[in-house]
Image: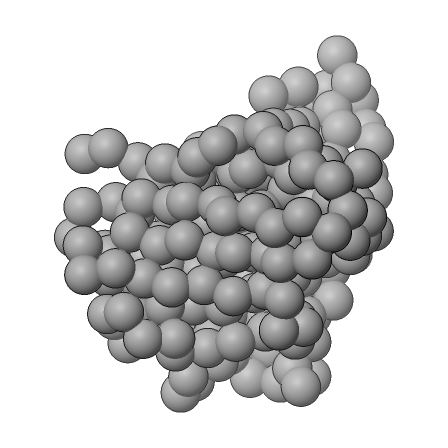
Amino acid sequence: KAGVTQTPRYLIKTRGQQVTLSCSPISGHRSVSWYQQTPGQGLQFLFEYFSETQRNKGNFPGRFSGRQFSNSRSEMNVSTLELGDSALYLCASSLGLAEFHEQYFGPGTRLTVT
Amino acid sequence: TQLLEQSPQFLSIQEGENLTVYCNSSSVFSSLQWYRQEPGEGPVLLVTVVTGGEVKKLKRLTFQFGDARKDSSLHITAAQPGDTGLYLCAGEEDSNYQLIWGAGTKLIIKP
């Protein structure tokens, strides 16, 4: 079974631009979560989508948004990029059921904002 | 807001030594997961513990969930360079599917 894939793997953007990251979950997984990871803040939860609906949301500004499609693939968008948005963005999929919300992570997208 | 505190934040030891990493909270979790992340990759799930007092072994790694389901530990016996990585714990809240993440323990095993 194929793992979680994320595209692109690396991205360089300029402050003020916007960016869209893509995530394809493991087949059969209905939940996709997004995380931001930086050396200073660690792993920070952005949001989770389950069956095309946002089920949980972390404490990030509205510039960060996401969506999930009917095939469970997900995208996240960051508008008006700031230097502090430079980070590794990780996507994780899970079955999304009540028991053991175990996360299967993709390799991440490394975003650099200059 | 539930918090998970991991300690130590950083650990560098020689190959062959034993070590323990801790994950503590003042709140109760329905389950707790441990992950290992290597540079340039996403975290990989190692184990999930569910029952208070539960002990699970994965080769040289021993995971324990506290009796009250508020804390957990990871013990590595005879550490090897391949154990190097960032170890993360994540607790699942009872009702809303959300995971609470610890800040991680960066472990370096020197040959």
Q: Quadrant of residue A14?
A: top right
Residue located 73% across and 20% down the image: B15
Q: Is residue B76 above or below residue B104?
A: above
Q: Quadrant of residue B57?
A: top left
Q: Position of residue A13 (x, y in %)?
A: 68, 37
Mark yes or no: residue B4 visible. Answer: yes
Position of B85 with respect to B65 (left or right) is right
Residue located 31% across and 75% down the image: A53
Q: Position of residue B2 (x, y in %)?
A: 65, 82
Quarter of the figure that contains the C terminus of chain B: top right
In this view, the residue in front, A104 or B71, is A104
Residue located 27% across and 69% down the image: A52
Residue located 48% across and 56% down the image: A76
Count of labels shown? 0
In this view, the residue in front, A85 or B103, is A85
Position of B60 with respect to A36 (left or right) is left
Farthest residue in the front direction?
A16
Colour mapping used in the image? one colour
Quarter of the figure that contains the N terminus of chain B: bottom right
In this view, the residue in front, B61 or A44, is A44
Q: Position of residue B20 (x, y in %)?
A: 70, 47
Mark yes or no: residue B22 visible. Answer: no
In this view, the residue in front, B15 or A65, is A65
Q: Position of residue A100 (x, y in %)?
A: 34, 66
